[in-house]
Image: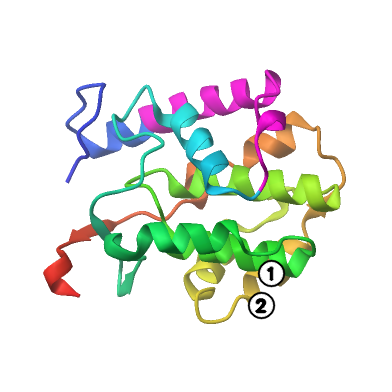
Amino acid sequence: MVLENKLGITESAELARQEERISKKKALELFENEILNSLDAGKFDSLAKIHKYLFEDIYTFAGEIRTVNIAKGNFRFAPVMYLKQALEHIDNMPQSTYEEIIEKYVEMNVAHPFREGNGRSTRIWLDLILKKELGKVVDWSNVDKEDYLLAMERSPIKNVEIRELLKQSLTSDVNNREVYMKGIDASYTYEGYFVYKTADL
């Protein structure tokens, strides 16, 4: 299924290519124009603004909470009926230590608030929190993509794996454009979502 998009693309591979091209260009603008510095680290409102900026040229739902239930494999992300409460809970989670920040990141992944583009947006959001609270960001070029995806799949049950994986790649080089841009690489992103009806719960 190809998501309805502003580009009029009906082929999934082409949409993925254009989505990555456009979102990377927009992410670079976020960085170079220092828009991220004006955002409140750790809040959903900031994540929504990041998502809107990255994807507003592609999807009408950019920055908006999804209105459908989605799943990957056997894992179902937060149901729509509980999504707003989940996001309010995440807003109020502490973020003063590395462990707290990763726990918050994992919870936001479980919420998966958008129909598409969660991974790229949330990695920028994670780095924004790390930068504000710890003066560090993740150097994503040092994170094995396969290990990351497997660790994220297991993180709702136990987050120690993703916590240790990202900890090894923390850097104080917070203003490095190349370090920042690696975080929005689409190959770190879950694929193969399917939509299910609330009645399927």
The residues tagged by marks 2 and 1 sit, at their Cα atoms, a distance apart of 5 Å
Residue 49 in the figure: left or right of residue 195: right
Q: Which residues are magenta?
A: 18-41
Quickly name the residue at label 1: 163
Q: Is residue 146 visible?
A: no
The spot of residue 170 in percent (x, y) is 80, 55
**Cβ atoms under marks 2 and 1 closer than 8 Å:** yes
Query: In this orientation, which residue lies closer to the viewer: 41 or 54?
Result: 41
Point 46% across, 51% down: residue: 189
Callout 2: 10 Å neighbours few (<14), some, many (20+)? some
Q: Is residue 40 left or right of residue 175?
A: left
Q: Secondary structure at mark 1?
A: helix
Residue 188 lies in the magenta-colored region: no
Q: Residues within 10 Å of mark 1 (few under 14, many from 20)?
A: many
For image coordinates 52% across by 51% down, the residue present is 188
**Chief secondary structure of the magenta span?**
helix
Q: For mark 2, give the secondary structure.
A: helix
Amino acid at the residue labelled 2: Val
Image point (84%, 53%), residue name: 134
Q: Is residue 26 visible?
A: yes
Is residue 65 placed above or below 75 in the rendered structure? above
Residue under label 2? 160
